[in-house]
Image (cartoon, grey):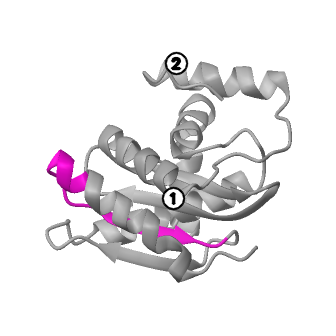
């Protein structure tokens, strides 16, 4: 399956709905599995930099999720860098011309076992971006995990990270 711009409309509409309900203005980006932009939308009053940040967050998820099942979303990528080498995240951002940034509100999009893209929401707080994107992902019917079974040690690692960043209720 190839993800196309028209496949993003339900997701974008759901983001708009939830963001308005929360009283925030955001930008939304969807990229293909290689990080190339498929669709981008900015709410009227969203910050001028938020489209670039949304694209960078989605690009980062595509780049890192394609490398390992240990990176189901931007929060886990961010925590991974914090624990190991924060400077490496800065270096990756510089070497990618600002396309690498890790934050909540971003995750991969799977069709079965194939990652077909990634999405990101940017413009509110990281927690709000996460709430908005999860709401929209569920409404769009997108899966952010592969149907391949994830090894128990990987699940434990990811769930430990969720607990560290205050999302202990969330489990892989």
| Marks 1/2: CA–CA distance | 27 Å
- What is the crowding at mark 2: few (fewer than 14 residues within 10 Å), some, or many (at least 20)? few
Disc 2 element = helix
Q: Is residue 62 magenta?
A: no
Residues at marks 1 and 2 touching, judged by CB atoms closer than 8 Å: no
- What is the crowding at mark 1: few (fewer than 14 residues within 10 Å), some, or many (at least 20)? some
Q: Name the residue under label 2.
A: 163
Give the residue at x 66% y 28%. Answer: 158
Q: Which mark is residue 161?
A: none
Q: Mark 1 points at which residue?
A: 140
> Does 91 appear above or below 81?
below
- Picture coordinates of residue 27 (x, y %)? 32, 66
Quarter placement of the C terminus: top right
Q: Which image quadrant is residue 79 in?
A: top right
In this rendered view, identify the residue nearer to me: 64 or 27. 27
Q: Which image quadrant is residue 54 in?
A: bottom left
Quarter placement of the N terminus: bottom right
> Is residue 97 visible to the viewer in this orientation of the structure?
no
Q: Which of marks 1 and 2 is nearer the N terminus?
A: 1
Q: Is residue 68 left or right of residue 101?
A: right
> Does 162 appear above or below 40?
above
In this rendered view, identify the residue nearer to me: 147 or 63. 147
Q: In this view, does 127 lie to the left or right of 85?
A: left
Give the residue at x 35% y 48%. Answer: 132
- Picture coordinates of residue 77 (x, y %)? 59, 42
> Is residue 150 visible to the viewer in this orientation of the structure?
yes
> Which residues, given as a range, are shown in magenta?
19-32
């Amino acid at each position: 399956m190839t993800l196309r711009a028209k496949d993003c409309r339900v997701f974008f509409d759901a983001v708009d709905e939830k963001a308005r309900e929360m009283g925030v203005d955001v930008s939304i980006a969807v990229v293909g599995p290689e990080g190339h932009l498929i669709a981008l939308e900015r709410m009227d009053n969203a910050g001028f930099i938020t489209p670039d940040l949304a694209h960078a967050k989605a690009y980062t998820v595509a780049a890192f999720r394609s490398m390992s099942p240990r990176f189901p979303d931007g929060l886990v990528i961010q925590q991974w860098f914090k624990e190991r080498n924060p400077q490496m995240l800065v270096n990756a951002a510089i070497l990618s011309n600002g396309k690498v940034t890790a934050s909540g509100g971003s995750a991969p999009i799977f069709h079965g076992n194939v990652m077909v893209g990634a999405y990101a929401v940017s413009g509110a707080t990281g927690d709000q971006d996460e709430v908005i994107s999860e709401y929209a992902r569920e409404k769009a019917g997108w899966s952010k995990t592969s149907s391949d079974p994830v090894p128990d040690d990987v699940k434990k690692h990811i769930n430990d990270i969720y607990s560290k960043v205050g999302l202990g209720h969330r489990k892989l």
